[in-house]
Amino acid sequence: MSIKSLSDRLARLILLPLVLFSSTVMAGFDELNMTQGVTPISQDIYGLHMIIMWICVAIGVVVFGVMFWSIFHHRKSRGAVASQFHHSTKAEILWTIVPVLILVGMAIPATRVLIAMENTGDSDMTIKVTGYQWKWEYEYIDEGVSFFSTLAASSNEARQLRSNRDPNKVEHYLLDVDKRLVVPVDTKIRFLTTSNDVIHAWWVPALGWKRDAIPGFINESWAIIEEPGVYRGQCAELCGRDHAFMPIVVVAKEKGEYEQWVAEQKAAQQAAAESGDRDWSMDELMARGEEVYGTNCAACHQANGEGVPGAFPSLTESEIVFGPKADHINVVLHGVDGTTMAAFGEQLSDAELAAVITYERNAWGNEMGDMVQPSEVKALR
Amino acid sequence: MSEAVAHHDEHHDHHPSGITRWLFTTNHKDIGTMYLVFSLIMFFVGGAMAMVIRAELFEPGLQFVDPQFFNSMTTMHALVMIFGVAMPAAVGFANWMVPMMIGAPDMALPRLNNWSFWILPFAFALLLLTLFLPGGGPAAGWTMYPPLMLQTGDAFPFVIFAVHFLGISSVMGAINIIATVFNMRAPGMSFMKLPLFVWAWIITAFLLIAAIPVLAGAVTMLLTDKFFGTSFFNAAGGGDPVMFQHIFWFFGHPEVYILILPAFGIVSQVIPTFARKPLFGYDSMVYATAAIAFMSFFVWAHHMFTVGMPLTGELFFMYATMSIAVPTGVKIFNWTATMWRGSMSFETPMLFAIAFIILFAIGGFSGLMLAIVPADFQYHDTYFVVAHFHYVLVTGTIFALFAGAYYWLPKWTGHMYNETLGQWHFWLSVISVNILFFPQHFLGLAGMPRRIPDYAVQFTEWNMVSSIGGFAFGLSQLLFVWMVIQCVRGGAKATDQVWEGAHGLEWTLPSPPPYHSFTTPPKVTDAVAHS
């Protein structure tokens, strides 16, 4: 963040008491409350949240009111003489029963909403959400469409340590992705969440819930989005170094537009599948490899390939990179057990894997000079 | 016979000086002092980590630390503050006060006492040194959820070992407190005459003995999963990562009450003293504390509503959690009723105790909101939760510990502390701590997840406010250290009773009390029993 914008923000801070309620200057300070969201359930939750908050405020006002009245009037400096009572069965029964009744009053609407939330039946479509360190995979189960969604490049550059980029100048900083999850409005969508490595949590506040993505288990939840729009969220369960950098963007479209989008995705996926059946040139592999490396590998091994000593191995002095191609392909395909090195075989196509391995063997002054073709990757799967 | 006893006592009074006094001491006061000094030092170690966190979160973008280091800061901050500050400080208070309050000469198991303290510095050396190991310190959160925890580098076995040590230390401390209270009460000091601080500690000690071995089991299973090929928490081997969370929180929720019950005990001593009026509803206070402790074993899954439990499970844990509000409410109402029609004065201990009641209640309210499962699906793992547990633990536990420290320092040192300094410390702390934590409610509701080193720009303003509050709160604590040093070195001579409204056996002893608190059992009358 530049000094200029820092000083702007500090100036706003100092002005806070003066202009708290004239809010155009104070956009950031307006973010005070839970979103009402865009699903019937999210609105119910907002309602529950507000009711319970106001009940708590009311109890607080009464209890603290009594306490402050006492603090003001029953002080020694005002000549108060202590009475010596220390018991009152009536009062004690009263302040046990009344809270019980209030709690029952809260539990009834909460139970009703919870039962509705857990009813994932009668859904019109299913999307499987899989968490990876640190990106999301979306699979449209009925359509056969699937893709990965990672932090947008603009945010990714600005979020590097001491990048000297001003996050305020990046559009939707940390809340933007390369490929968005597109869904239709007014449709009961069932979300299946799971994970490929550690536990993540998929959370879009506008949908009203978050759900853990747990390796080896599948969780169900659902949403009916009523308004077209773009809704942003983040991973909500600590999942390692880049936990803060795996956002979620959901685009809700009218049904017609959604169908059109699905058709486009199917065509694009077909084209990508065919690209794995031919031989690629060195320039093609290096260019594609650099992109793939940036999205999938740079978070740990760093953009310059030097890794982080003690945590993530360097690729510029690596026995695997400088060894036979087959070993290198195997490590990337199948991962390394007991480390953060994931098995990318499930995540990347043959062409992408061939490109990124070629890139690693020939970038940053590595001079292996060899190429890996998609067919070689396919053979080792 | 009496000659032999006298000789025996003399022998004990002749204690070594210098470092060996502290290394080999079996005296409850010396050990209590070491616990308290240790926890004060760790308060600044954990506080320094919090300052790193707040500095990085002052504005969006990564300015100071790598995300991995940030994660190890949040992890270590929690471990240090829970196991290095709140728990040892509470044990320190127990060591000093329990024998004096029940009319005993010392703790029942003095050598165990020495050992349970001296494990701590080694355990923390082990834990803190992991920050310098290849791969850095533990960074999977203090909750250590697998599979993420299993990705920890060389630090992993050291962390597990340190946690085992800390657990052993706590359990030994708990055994000692139970043995002391059950066996060494002065004649006439029946259970229902015990000061509430002692009651709170007995119940805490039972919680410790029940809960800590569960944690030990959980981390041992992590260890075997990592090094010995077991699959307790690995779905691919037939295990279940969620099972860890169930086991962890079966320890973790009672742990929450382990941290807060001694604080309840301290506040129950302070409020009647400065209201100059007996505690309202002593019996119901004891029963409410016991009820809270018992119920704490049936609510653990409210920490993990989003893992995908069956509906009936979610409903059970929601209702059970909400029902804890009833005994907790009873305590708040009893304290308020104690103040009602009293004759109050507002020395520093009373100020911290009143702030405790109000701010702890605010933490209780947000806790009630978090119990509502549908709403929890929004709140869970956001800054709303961070705000909630800091209200409960900082303005709750830590404020009560401050209240206790100001309350008993004159008794311990024989000198009055500097009241002006105490008042400054209180007002600076209570204002800055609210600037620090209140905005975090807004951040969480607006959608900021916890445990992130960088955030979207709409969260900037409240993070700045929170960080400024954090720096101010951190600096204010230096006043406390200065006050303690001053008080130990000198000051106005404290009387035996110290406070006009103080009742209880500890106030019948001189200030400072003799090396062995009660060498002959005191006479327990209604006047010196619980106030």
Image (cartoon, rainbow, N blue to C red):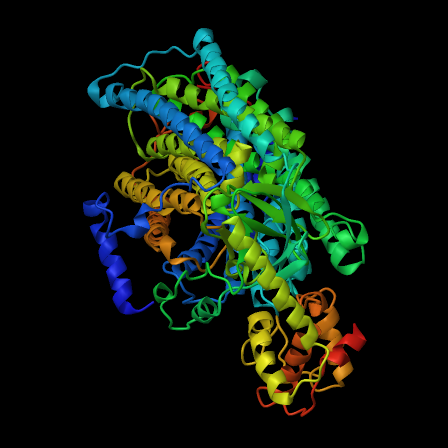
Locate residue B496 relative to residue B452 in the image: left or right: left
Question: Measured along the vertical axis of the image, is residue A160 above or below residue A100?
Answer: below
Locate residue B203 relative to residue A55 in the image: left or right: right
Locate residue B530 relative to residue B314 in the image: left or right: left
Q: Can you say which quadrant of the picture contains the C terminus of chain A?
A: bottom right
Q: Which residue corresponds to the image point at 42% horizontal and 73% vertical from the top-left?
A: A163
Q: Nearer the viewer, residue B368 or B15?
A: B368
Locate residue B298 relative to residue B379 in the image: left or right: right
Q: Which residue corresponds to the image point at 42% horizontal and 28% vertical from the top-left?
A: A51
Q: Can you say which quadrant of the picture contains the N terminus of chain A?
A: bottom left
Q: Nearer the viewer, residue A120 or A59?
A: A120
Q: Position of residue A216 (x, y in %)?
A: 73, 51
**Quarter of the rendering containing residue B270:** top left
Residue B24 visible to the viewer: no
Q: Position of residue B65 (x, y in %)?
A: 46, 66
Q: Which residue corresponds to the image point at 58% horizontal and 90% vertical from the top-left?
A: A365
Q: Nearer the viewer, residue A130 or A62?
A: A130
**Quarter of the rendering containing residue A371:** bottom right
Q: Position of residue A154 (x, y in %)?
A: 44, 69
What residue occupies the far left of the structure in this picture?
A18
Q: Nearer the viewer, residue A39 or A2?
A: A39
Q: Position of residue B492 (x, y in %)?
A: 29, 38
Question: Measured along the vertical axis of the image, is residue A197 above or below residue A269?
Answer: above
Residue B250 visible to the viewer: yes
Question: Measured along the vertical axis of the image, is residue B134 above or below residue B161?
Answer: below
Q: How many marks?
A: 0
